[in-house]
Amino acid sequence: MNVHAILGDGGAVARRLPGYEARPQQLAMAEAVAHAIAARSHLIVEAGTGVGKSFAYLVPAILDAVASRKKVVVSTHTINLQEQLLLKDIPFLQGVLPSPFDAVLVKGRGNYLSLRRLRSAKE
């Protein structure tokens, strides 16, 4: 299965979301991401609001991870985007993509309580 079969007109996403319309920019980005993953090369993409960037990088990354039985890491700039991916986008894709996959959230240590700092603040 490829990105067009998932994100394109009549694709898996369109069958699950009434009123879904394929976006040419999203498909182009997803194809570029898939090509970069296959070539094991770097890619820089700039896309505006509403392009569907999350699905454009998640779909090819997940397809490759499942096919190669490897893990993929997605790093986000904000906690809000982490939560969107983990609570909304990834669960949706788990119901759309043909092969099962798991996702976990890993946070940096700055997101956890430091017992030493807590004790120091209490004193």
Image (cartoon, rainbow, N blue to C red):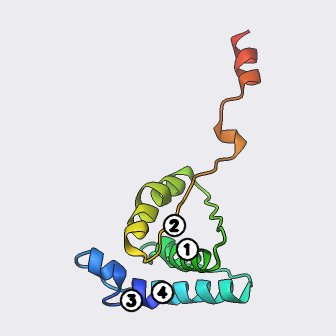
Q: CA distance from mark 2 to mark 1?
A: 8 Å
Q: Which mark identifies residue 8?
A: 3
Q: Which mark identifies residue 62?
A: 1
Q: CA distance from mark 3 to mark 2?
A: 21 Å
The number of numbered badges drawn on the structure is 4
| Residue at image point 51% right, 66% down | 101
Indicate the position of residue 120 as horizontal and vertical percent values.
Answer: 76, 16
| Residue at image point 65% right, 64% down | 73
Residue carrying label 4: 3
Task: Estimate how packed mark 1 is, as few (under 14), some (14 to 19) or many (20 or more) residues with alpha carbons within 10 Å.
Answer: many
Indicate the position of residue 90 as horizontal and vertical percent values.
Answer: 46, 64
Q: CA distance from mark 3 to mark 4?
A: 7 Å
Query: Where is residue 22, by image quadrant?
Result: bottom left
Three-letter amino acid code of the residue under disc 2:
Phe
Camera-side residue: 49 or 68?
A: 68
Q: CA distance from mark 1 to mark 4?
A: 10 Å
Camera-side residue: 25 or 112?
A: 112
Q: Are marks 3 and 1 in contact (CB under 8 Å)?
A: no
| Residue at image point 72% right, 89% down | 39
Residue carrying label 2: 101
